[in-house]
Amino acid sequence: MKKSLWQIYSQKQLDELSHLTENYKAFLDAGKTERECVTEIIRQAELAGYKNINNVTQVKAGDKLYQDWMGKSIVLFHIGEEEIEKGMNILGAHIDSPRLDLKQNPLYEESGFAYLDTHYYGGIKKYQWVTIPLAIHGVVVRKDGSKVQISIGENEGDPVFVITDLLVHLSSKQMEKKASTVIEGESLDILVGSRPLVGEEKDAVAENIMNLLAYTYQIEKDDFMSAELEVVPSGRARDCGFDRSMIMAYGQDDRVCAYTSLAAMFDAENIKRTSCCILVDKEEIGSVGATGMNSRFFENAVAEMLEKMGNFTEMKLRRVLANSKMISSDVGAAYDPMYSDVYDKKSNPFFGYGMVLNKHTGARGKSGSNDANAEYIAQLRRVFDENEVKFQLTEMGKIDIGGGGTIAYILAQYGMEVIDGGVAVLCMHAPWEVTSKADVYEAYRGYKAFLEQMSEK
Ligand code: MN
Ligand code: MN
């Protein structure tokens, strides 16, 4: 086996690594939902000199622009000197993560307990979500259009919430069940109270909760109909291991690639081609909806930019997109020796050995994948080697075991070159996921080299 990144980094690189990963942890803490991520990204982008494209009338080389879509997805552009028709260098990651969403009529009472009913979002192992402290993040929009931001369960003094599990003493039947049914979707309701309102007879506990919500947030029961409240693990991103070589946090799929792509976008210097960073919602449920990658918001943002360059024609738009090159920044499944039988050691990524490139993703014979062109991979190898970026060409586990997809195939529809490239993750989609700090840093280095040096040919 080659050397681990930890064995080759200089002191300067190690210092850069720790600076980047501290900022990454702060980003994770600031954004536990797609909406919170977009708010934080806009804050950082404006500090870095980016302007909302809607407030700009003319666009020229050197300009830094962003457009957010419904506060859940965002595209950033840094305009290069090169003729835009020759294409852009695009990084695209997603900022939604698996979680539990509150249903639209969630509050109910049973046997002296008040619960909020949930419907899970994305691929989860349901049994992982019981008996851990949970927080609620999101928005409630009142009928008059006013909006309440909610984030409860993260600060030291905040209460947290929980999904109960059966005590082991009474679990002989439950323990016989398959892992997929041991906790059912309809049982993933979060416990939010047990104290009845004085003087109330019926549903006195739930009434008390509703009173507290009315008092704290000025919302009423019907307002849940127009709310997006997401239940996520409570707690901050932490260093993991005695050697602090890893990060344990919620939502690293795919905020690890979102953050490193964003940081590369901010730091890339002397770019020739226009740089673009897409940070998008809804990947975990199939890139659907107005804020998912299948929506036209990205194409529209490019059209908007061309229009403001005084340059828009339908033909130009198509050329810009077709001639672009993209890294679909998404995570890979790190080799886990505890579960070695599902991996092919020869083609799975290892912790601390660099950026993960996937020629193809998908399942059952590459179905649903993108399958990057050999010519493009060769070009990427040149860029990475020239910049001493370490990478691993990988797949997700053994062929017939499972698989997964990303947004790569959607951008490939424009005819552009696309490859999946990101960071290896342990226990992906679990409430707490683990990454290697070295791989986080190396992905950042790889994305930056790509933005600076990927060329037309
Ligand atoms: Mn992902
Ligand atoms: Mn995922």
Image (tube, helix red, strand yellow):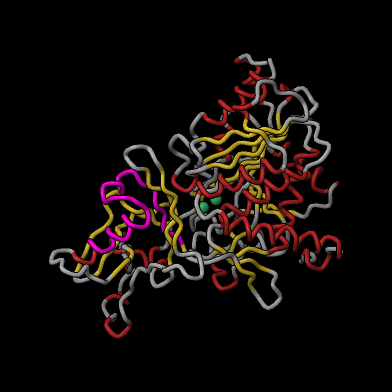
Choose top left, top right, bottom left or bottom right for residue 276: top right
First to last magenta residue range: 207-232
Residue 226 on the magenta span:
yes
The residue at the point 64 percent across, 48 percent down is 358
Task: Tell me the quadrant of the picture where the C terminus can be found.
Answer: top right
Horizontally, is 359 left or right of 61 in the view? left
- Residue 359 lies, in percent from the top left, at 64, 45
The residue at the point 34 percent across, 54 percent down is 102
Main SS class of the magenta portion in the image = helix
Horizontally, is 344 left or right of 219 in the view? right
Above or below for 142 versus 422: above
Return the residue nearer the eye: 19 or 88. 19
Residue 367 on the magenta span:
no
Is residue 348 at all visible to an observer of this figure? no
Return the residue nearer the eye: 390 or 202. 202
- Residue 162 lies, in percent from the top left, at 37, 69
Above or below for 387 versus 414: below
- Residue 366 lies, in percent from the top left, at 53, 45
Return the residue nearer the eye: 158 or 320. 158
